[in-house]
Amino acid sequence: MPPKMFIVAGPPGSGKSTAFPVAAFGVDYFNADDHAAALNNGSYCDIPREIRSRVNVLFETFVLDHIHARSSFALETTLRSAVTFEQAALARRAGFVVEMRYLCLPNFEMHLERVMMRADRGGHSAPEPVMRGIYESSIANLSRAIREMDLIYVYENGDWGETPVILLQAEHGEIVYRAERIPQWLARSLSRL
């Protein structure tokens, strides 16, 4: 059985850690927010840039070490940059199967509201312009993920306490399931395919 790289992706506030916690995949995992908080005396608030930079190095090392060892692993990401695609390509060349679960809420305002609620409970947050940029980049990168991941499941996670609704499934770049009704954010991504 080939090793697996599990990726849980989506904009901030989409419910990644709640719906698909990386610890639940039964493999080694890395959650950058948890590592940053640990280095910030247990606090998710006001994490300094130097701690984020240190965590990024630890994250990269974790991924590369697991690929080199051909050992399955899981990670969480906002999918705002190309680094996840570069890591997935390395993993595939090493014989991994790369599987992604992507979550999004119906609109940006819901993401913003959930992140503000999380911040009120002592969780991590970001200013609205930063969040909007991450949101737009993540949505824009979804079409690439659909093309490049071995398996991808795309969900909308709009209702509190409910199971996310699957909207799309693709295997090796081919869409094998698509919901009858898709939200605008997914329609935008699919228009880039």
Image (cartoon, helix red, strand yellow):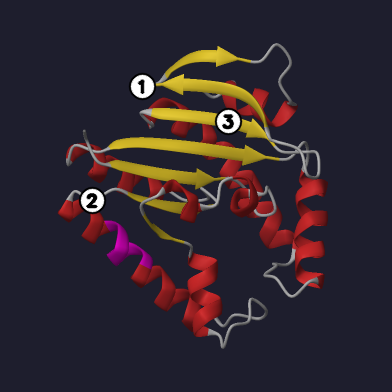
Which quadrant of the rendered structure holds the N terminus? top left
Residue drawn at (69%, 57%) of the image: 131
Q: Earlier in the sequence, mark 2 or mark 1?
A: 2
Residue 27 position, x and y percent, is 36, 52
Residue 55 position, x and y percent, is 43, 73
Q: Residue 128, relative to residue 81: is it above or below?
A: below
Numbered tag placed on residue 154 in the rendering: 3
Residue 184 position, x and y percent, is 73, 27
Q: Which stretch is magenta? A: 59-63
Residue drawn at (44%, 47%) of the image: 25
Identify residue for label 1: 172
Q: Are marks 2 and 1 in contact (CB under 8 Å)?
A: no
Which amino acid lies under the numbered mark 1 shown in the image of this protein?
Answer: His
Residues under labels 1 and 3: Cα distance?
14 Å
User: How dense is the environment of label 3, judged by Cα within 10 Å: few (below 14), some, or many (20 and up)?
Assistant: many
- Name the front one of labels 3 and 2: 2
Q: Residue 191, relative to residue 126: is it above or below?
A: above
Q: Residue 174, relative to residue 7: is it above or below?
A: above
